[in-house]
Image: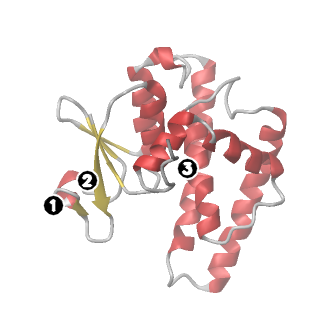
Amino acid sequence: MKLYYAAGACSLSPHIVALEAGIPLELEKVDTKAKLTESGKDFWQINPKGYVPVLELDSGELLTEGPAIVQYLADHKPQSGLAPANGTTARYHLQEMLGYINSELHKSYSPLFKPETPDVTREERKAYLRKRYAFLEQRLAQHPWLVGDHFSVADAYLFTVTNWAKHVDLELSDFPAVLDFQKRVAARPKVQAALEAEGLIKKAAA
């Protein structure tokens, strides 16, 4: 399988999930501004939506949208425990959390990355995000992981999105449980490997 990604973008989430599940991936970097892949392909021809992630399956079929991709990867290796079994209440709770992160956090960050976004809109989005993080703070103060008692695809997604806070000057110091969660996820060996592969951290000295 091949993952089309951009360093540090939401495609980091499926990258982490694949490594955690032990699924080998070929990586192809995408210049999201020029819409060209590392090998010179027109990215619009790969994903008419114009954004990462895209997972190319062994069959050649393409799968887009991060929440769908991470569930596909988890189901590809169910023994990884990264997603509850389909049809269970726990699986619907996982989808509930993926939906929350996708609609309430992920999309709320988007205008903060655009230099043309007016200051008033920027501050409104930051205030909105802090309200949404308040819910997660309560949850993570009681449980180390978002769903169940171990790391799941939802945790990979939340970690990826929350990593953006430092790039847009979103202050999260009022959310110690969220910050502890970020440190806990960042310390996982497979997460470190994904961050290194995308050039987001330097490789540790041997």
Residue 47, which numbered label?
A: 2
How packed mark 1 is, by other alpha carbons closer than 10 Å (few <14, some 14-19, many 20 or more), is few
Whole-percent x, y for residue 13 in the image: 48, 44
Q: Is residue 3 above or below residue 148?
A: below
Q: Earlier in the sequence, mark 2 or mark 3?
A: 2
Say which residue label 3 marks.
160
Quadrant in the rendering for residue 181:
top right
Whole-percent x, y for residue 112 in the image: 57, 72
Lateral position of residue 151 relative to residue 5, left or right? right
Q: Is residue 127 above or below residue 15?
A: below
Whole-percent x, y for residue 27 in the image: 30, 45
Residue 184, which numbered label?
A: none
Q: Secondary structure at mark 3?
A: helix
In the foreground, 15 or 72: 15
The type of residue carrying mark 1 is: Gly
Q: Earlier in the sequence, mark 1 or mark 2?
A: 1
Residue 40, which numbered label?
A: 1
